[in-house]
Image (cartoon, rainbow, N blue to C red):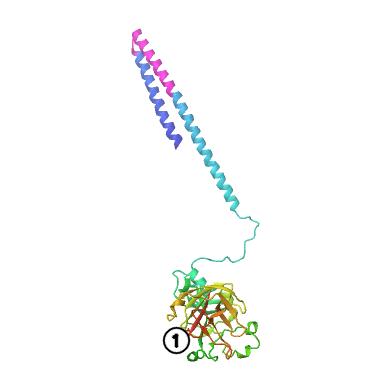
Amino acid sequence: FYFNNMDLQYGVYFSLITLALILSLIECQTCSNALCKRRDITRLEDEITEVKDGVRKMSTEMKERNDKLSGELSKMMDHLDARLSIIAGERPSVTKKPSRRKESCTCVDPLLGSSEAHAAKSCLEIIQLRRPVPPSGLYWIALTPDFATRLYCDMVTDGGGFTLVWTFTLTDYNNFASKGNDVTPRPNWDINIFMSPIYTPFVKVPVSTTPPESEDDLGALNFKYWKQIGNADFVVKSNLANWIACTGKGSILEEDKEGPITCKVVKFISTEHPECKDDTPTYVNWSPICGLILQRDGKDYINFDIASSACIPKFDPCAEGSGKRYVKNVDIPRGNVYIR
């Protein structure tokens, strides 16, 4: 298109000049006197000189334009060569066998957890892959490749994605300081791993492997699955003390895995002790006498006591090991343990 326009422009220009010369020659031939001829010849010479100058100028312009266009075409060819090299480098080898490994999907799945056929790996996966984020409730979780069950998910507390694995009450809330007051039921921990053989005979509370379907439903998920659906994060709720969210090296997912934790209060329950509204435990202790305990500086914050006649449960928002700072006048004492 560029060359066609330029050729048309110069063709018209040359045609007009040629026509002018022909007319001038015709006009000169019609003159009879010598003065007319000399005048016409002089004018023709001037016009020829002007035409030569014009041709020379157009020739220079055409060369400059052709050089510029040639440079642009050269750049375009270089760019196309570079793109071909990139495409050739990205093309898989014809001798390479395609991978049979199933790629993980990070796409949004609106049905995840809604049925056994769409079971999720955990409540955390559901909150990560479903949009909009679903409410707290029961969702299907795959505990093995061949077994899925419905578990309760908290989609709100501390960012959500927590799985309810244990709901408990107390055996004798009205006599809180009695050694016959224990947390019940308990998960199917292997108490021989962390408890002294002297105190294992005192563990009499029933074991549960039936996961709770709500925060009011007593029970515990089979302990062997806790590590599968949880990691370092856990939440403890109760109507006996402040709710806390924790994470750290200390673990409630493995018997006898003690260590430091970092916690924060996520809901203030112990209104009778506002001076302790920010106090939290800092350590997971698998006690050889009492069972699982969350402590700070060796003093109990929450003692999940399972050993009758040996210990008493404690829910002390001030983390000083007191057995008297629990919330009073509760109709149905209850606690919930979530993992993420």
| Coordinates of residue 259 in the picture (x, y in percent) | 60, 74
Query: Where's the N terminus, which quadrant?
Result: top left
Percent position of residue 148, x then y: 55, 78
Q: Which residues are magenta?
A: 30-54
Does 237 appear in magenta?
no
Q: Nearer the viewer, residue 258 or 275?
A: 275
Number of residues whose C-alpha sits closer than 10 Å to that of mark 1, classed few (under 14), some (14–19) or many (20 or more): some
Image: 171 above or below 122: below
Name the magenta segment's main secondary structure. helix
Task: Indicate left or right for 90 with 128 as reference.
Answer: right
Tell me the residue at 59%/79% (across/down): 285
* Residue at x 42% of width, y 23% of height: 54
- The residue at 54%/44% (across/down) is 80
Label 1 sits on what residue type?
Lys
Give the total of numbered labels: 1
Q: Would residue 244 be seen by someone viewing this image from the given angle?
A: yes
Q: Considering only vertical position in the picture, is 299 above or below 125?
A: below
Q: Position of residue 59 (x, y in %)?
A: 47, 26
Q: Say whether residue 120 is visible.
A: no
- Vertical placement of 245 versus 81: above or below? below
In the image, residue 84 above or below residue 189: above
Image quadrant in which you'd find residue 299: bottom right
Q: Secondary structure at mark 1?
A: loop
Q: Nearer the viewer, residue 75 or 203?
A: 203
User: Is 32 on the left-hand or right-hand side of 170?
Assistant: left
Where residue 74 appears, x then y in whole percent? 53, 38
Magenta highlight on residue 45: yes
Q: Which residue is mark 1?
A: 328
Q: Which one is nearer the viewer's eye here, 85 or 12?
A: 85
